[in-house]
Amino acid sequence: MKTAVTAGLFAATCLTAAAHADALDDIISSGTLRCAVVLDFPPMGSRDEANNPIGFDVDYCNDLAAALGVEAEIVETPFPERIPALMSGRVDVGVASTSDTLERAKTVGMTIPYFAFQMAVTANDASGITSFEDMKGKTVGATAGTYEAIALEEQVKEWGEGTFRPYQTQADVFLALSQGQLDATVSTSTVAQANVKTGNFPGISVVGNAPFDTDYVALFAMREEYGLINFLNLFINQQVRTGRYAELYEKWVGGDLPDLTVGGTYR
Amino acid sequence: MFDTALTWNDMAFLAQGAWMTLMVTAVAVVAGTVMGIVFGVLRYQAGPYWSLPLTFVLDIFRSVPLLIQLVLGNAFQSIARLGWDPFTTSCVILSLYTAAYCTEIVRGGIEAVPPTTRRAARSLGMTWRQDMMHIVAPLATRVSLPAWIGLTLGVLKDSSLVLWLGLIELLRASQILVTRLQEPLFILLICGAIYFLISFPIARLGGYLEKRWSPND
Amino acid sequence: MFNYTFRWNQAFNALPRLLEGALVTLEIALLSMLIGIVIAILLTGFRLSGNALLSAIARTWVEVARNTPALFQIYMAHFGLGAFGIHLSPYTSLLAGIAFNNAGYLAENFRGALKAIPDTQTRSARSLGMPAIQAFRLIVMPQMLRIAFLPATNQMVWAILMTSLGVTVGMNTDLAGITQELNARSFRTFEFFAMAAVIYYLIAKAVTLAARALAWRMFRY
């Protein structure tokens, strides 16, 4: 075991020593930008009839690649695999609707927000839930590890009754909801509307907003790659400036464009 | 017939998933068996005391859930920046996992060869190598084959866990279709049927060989 | 170098929670084993009954349990049954899935064990005037359980390993579930899963040793 680890360390040293250019340079010279995208998170990422990737995040990655003058490659990652994919150098950037929590920023580098979610409550019609408060004492769930899952679990603990269930994918949450395994879920309102709109899930509807803070999501890259993160920040700024952000929002979501700035502070 | 939105296109998608399952299984079983034979012979030759470190390491692979192994292996390769894609990572972990079980099977097979037979071979002037190749290998294979087929089946089924790393194998392909078409029961049944169709004939072959080759026929 | 700083203290702080999860894991494994043994004995009985329908049920159960992935079985117990309006909680789905799997494998073990018990024993028991049920219960079953004990121990270890699959159906109180939750919050995958791996290893070893001690007490001549 020990020799294996030593050998592994040695191999790792050799590999990293060779490639120590800036990530931004690497992307441009390699000619491809590899983005981690979550594809069961419509409208941000999903698959069309031919099972090809589509969605806001997919388009965003394509724009980013165009800005860099390279080809885009969409790497599907389930939610839990986003970070290992980045760490192992399988992807360059995460365009994966990742909430910019401080806990995560200890591990990866987050950009300024590129999208913002409002939280909505979606309920199974049979449960009789019509507002956030009605969820007290019911069986509720959300996608494991997401911003809303963490907030909802804390809320359930505070109420002291009812159960919370995390599922590994957004798809499983809505499947469980439409089957009646869950009475209600809190998800981003865009995701909720997109799922209800598909007509795939009979008997569920969006019943209101959840009083959680706005969930700002960021692109992420290796923590020490400041050159790349700088570029990404400027890119996000340009997307908003040029109206491309509004255009993509209209295309995939529709409605009021969420503000990406927080009043009364820098950054 | 069911009223389903499932198209031939989707069936092809499932078939692709099944192909991925078969590929991962094939790589893992071949690599795992080769390693298993090496480790098995090593364990037998070194004796229980000297092979203790090897036994311990292989035992870990049999006592920790495969899901945890996969996640951990993936995290390790990402920390070491090996840059493996999910397919490579899955194959490496599954191969080691297979090897851990295969070692025991091989060792059991070798131990089942009567020492008298081997001594007879050696006293006829055969070298250790010849003894291993011409006496032990055929006899041990006979004893171990049913268990090895069982292991292959196990790996085939356990390979469904690689979906966690984002590899689109049979079960993951089904989940993707369930997400889009919302017909969980129907699609999952098809998925189960495909697994069954692949593994049942192999299981039957194993059962047949076991019967055919059982020690006292 | 590694370009990654391990933060083990974070993982050690979570140790109490992980150990709580380990208890749940052990509980599910034990329960699934008990249920599995009961069903497996029933299935074995079905097979021996000579009734075509009963033995077909037993055969189907065994073949499906042994020829589809455990992950599939658990997923089916949750979302497959859910489509029929049968709602099992993650805990129950996981338990049902593993028990289903255990029953299939154990029934096959029992069948193999039965074959090893000479037919003459049943016949002599019957000729001593025992009814068929009694002959099975008093003569055959104790021997069958002894022969099947070692494979059953392996199945128990399997059951522990299978509990980790509960995360796919929303289980968040067992060891794997808690590990995954901690991981999703902080992205410190390696530390938390390494910790979980050690705990799983220790549980599996403890169970194997306990089973050996039990076998030594119960089955020595």
Image (tube, coloured by chain):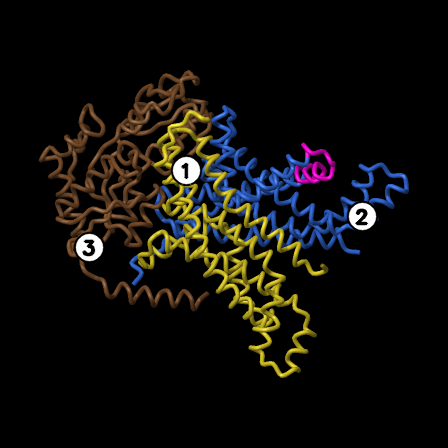
Residue designated by label 3: A23
Query: Neighbour class for label 2 at 10 Å: few (<14), some, many (≥20)?
Result: few
The answer to whether B13 appears left or right of A36 in the picture is right
Query: Neighbour class for label 1 at 10 Å: few (<14), some, many (≥20)?
Result: many
Q: Position of residue C168 (x, y in %)?
A: 45, 39
- The answer for how far apart the CA atoms under marks 2 and 3 are is 73 Å
Hue of chain A? brown
- The answer for how far apart the CA atoms under marks 2 and 1 are is 47 Å
Query: Residue at 47% across / 26% down in the picture?
Result: C83
Which amino acid does the dot numbered 1 rest on?
A: Ser
Query: Residue at 19% across / 30% down in the picture?
Result: A249
Q: Tell me where the magenta segment starts and ends, as one range.
A: C39-54
Return the residue nearer the eye: B16 or A23.
B16
Which amino acid does the dot numbered 3 rest on?
A: Ala
Return the residue nearer the eye: C117 or A188.
C117
Residue B174 tag number: 1
Placement of A117 over or under C221, stated as above or below: above
Chain coloured yellow in the rendered structure: B
Q: Position of residue C196 (x, y in %)?
A: 47, 49
